[in-house]
């Protein structure tokens, strides 16, 4: 592991820049830092899901592994040119996605985010995953971004959707379908 922080504040960011690995300084609102921040926020949102008591063990194992992957992804973004995320990580997500999705009934309508604290938190993490993916695509418009990163986030948002469905059933027994016939005012 690289540098360990013995003091949290450094004052080096007071000028509106932040450091990447290798001591390069870039603006805090650059597309790269926006992407790193969105991935960090996503990892924190997954931590909120994991903080809910009574999660199924397979969900906990899966999301904990995802948190490690997201650290890899953020590390790769902070060290341009280094490869930390591989296609194997996306393949693992796809396998988990299939395993969690297979026992679920097919969707016949849109569902509302919710279903209990863990399911709702998982829906929020899914939305943040989509934002992180958009931030990565914004970065890709101005700098090279390895395709494994955007593919991973795309698949992760799918997995989080399926896990939200699993957790809704675990917590409440059902999902809430979007109703289009609820009597809108005219």
Image (tube, rainbow, N blue to C red):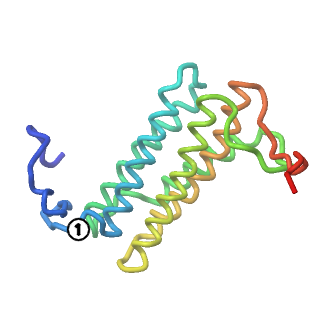
Looking at the image, residue 92 sits to the left or right of residue 145; the answer is right
**Residue closer to the observer: 73 or 29:** 29
Image location of residue 166, percent across then percent down: 69, 35
Report the residue that reaches farthest toward the bottom: 142
Looking at the image, residue 10 sits to the left or right of residue 19; the answer is left
Q: Which residue: 70% across, 32% down?
A: 115
Instruction: Examine the rendered structure and indicate whether residue 141 appears above or below residue 137.
Output: below
Instruction: Examine the rendered structure and indicate whether residue 48 appears above or below residue 12.
Output: above
Instruction: Examine the rendered structure and indicate whether residue 86 appears above or below residue 142.
Output: above
Residue placed under numbered mark 1 in the picture: 27
Image location of residue 139, percent across then percent down: 39, 72
Q: Callout 1: few (<14), some (14-19), or many (20+) C-alpha neighbours within 10 Å?
A: some
**Residue closer to the observer: 32 or 75:** 32
Image location of residue 23, percent across then percent down: 12, 63
Looking at the image, residue 152 sits to the left or right of residue 123; the answer is left
Q: Looking at the image, how many numbered discs can be counted on the residues? A: 1
Looking at the image, residue 92 sits to the left or right of residue 177; the answer is left
Residue 22 quadrant: bottom left
Q: Which residue: 31% across, 62% down?
A: 33
């Amino acid at each position: 592991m690289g540098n360990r922080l013995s003091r949290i504040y450094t004052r080096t960011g007071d000028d509106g820049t932040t450091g990447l690995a290798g001591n390069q300084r870039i603006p805090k609102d650059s597309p790269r830092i926006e992407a790193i921040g969105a991935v960090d926020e996503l990892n924190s949102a997954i931590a909120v899901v994991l903080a809910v008591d009574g999660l199924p063990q397979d969900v906990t194992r899966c999301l904990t592994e995802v948190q490690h992957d997201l650290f890899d992804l953020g590390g790769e973004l902070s060290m341009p040119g280094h490869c930390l995320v591989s296609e194997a990580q996306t393949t693992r997500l796809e396998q988990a996605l299939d395993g969690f999705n297979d026992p679920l009934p097919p969707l016949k309508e849109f569902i509302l985010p919710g279903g209990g604290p863990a399911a709702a938190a998982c829906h929020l993490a899914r939305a943040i995953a989509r934002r992180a993916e958009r931030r990565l695509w914004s970065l890709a418009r101005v700098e090279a971004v390895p395709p494994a990163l955007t593919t991973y986030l795309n698949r992760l948002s799918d997995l989080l959707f399926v896990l939200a469905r699993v957790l809704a059933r675990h917590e409440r027994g059902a999902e809430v379908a979007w109703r289009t016939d609820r009597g809108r005012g005219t």
